[in-house]
Image: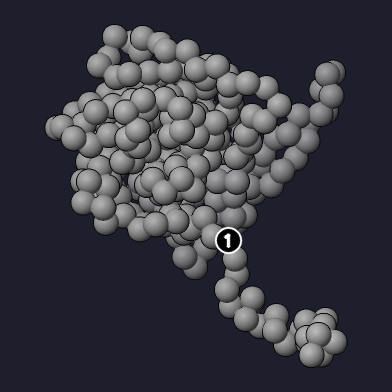
Amino acid sequence: MLRILITNDDGIDALGIKRLAEALLTLEGADIYLVAPQEEKSGVGHGLTLRSALDPQERDFYGLPVKAWAINGNPADCVKAAYHLLFEDGQKPDIVFSGINVGTNLGRDIYYSGTCSGAREAVILGVPGVALSYDNWFDQENYGEVTEMIQPLVREFAEQAKKGVLPENVFWNVNIPHVPQAQIKGIVPASLSLNHYEDKYSKEEEGYFLMREYPEAEPPAELLDYDLVKSGYIAVTPVHIDATDKALLKEMGEWSFVKSWGKREG
């Protein structure tokens, strides 16, 4: 039996998490659990609830055969609570799927995204994590054929999790174009696009709102996650949670303050 945990950042009542559950329920021999924020928590990054108590509430979930809780916290809280509090038999999830998010999480979005933090927290706890996002920001009630489109992906990740062969310290960031399934060109590995938008603030009566602008740019030498999704591909990015620059760490041994400190100690 494969034990699967689902979470998201759009809240337990969001349509995207229902679509994800429906896709996972097609897997044979899967035991599905769902722990999600009781309200929308988009853009909270990897925030944790530290100064108030978490209060998991068991919920019916659209009548689907999953065991579900809503939590007054963030996506990372949901995964932590599931791992430490909610599995009474002491067993842990074999894999965590987070999403399906309204809108993409591309490039540096991975640092702001609650969806990505759900998958990242799983990996921190030693459990494989997969974040899924759908490019429907301007058509939010329309999830099209996304359930059918992600079935091969979730099946592959679930099988690899069952075999225990997914790499440690990596979560998978999946972004899906908002097109009919017949127009999907393929599923491809992709690097993060870190500069495809610019932050701008729009002044309104209430104050300043953070906005994004997508400037015209020359075609990149390498097609990154943003370019691939906009071209009709499902982009899959392995994201390592150890952000240490190992090459630079080695080079720092020659920096003057490091060498001078070493001499004083010697």
Query: Residue 64: which quarter of the image?
Result: top left
Q: Which residue is mark 1?
A: 243
Q: Element type at marker 1?
A: loop
Frontmost residue, 168 versus 136? 168
Left or right: where 60 falls relative to 206: left
Residue at the spot 27% in from the left edge and 24% down from the top edge: 22
Q: Give the side of residue 170 with respect to residue 199, left or right.
A: left
Q: Locate residue 185, reporting x and y percent.
A: 29, 48
- The amino acid on which the numbered mark 1 sits, given as a three-letter code, is Ala
Q: Is residue 54 above or below residue 83?
A: above
Q: Residue at x 53, y 40 (%)?
A: 117
Which residue is nearer to you in this view: 183 or 136?
Answer: 136
Q: Nearer the viewer, residue 257 or 21?
A: 257
One can see residue 134 in this view? no
**Image coords of residue 133 (percent x, y):** 44, 36
28 vs 207: above or below: below
What residue is drawn where x is 27% and y is 34%? 3
Residue 60 at least partly seen: yes
Q: Is 130 displayed left or right of 27 in the figure?
A: right
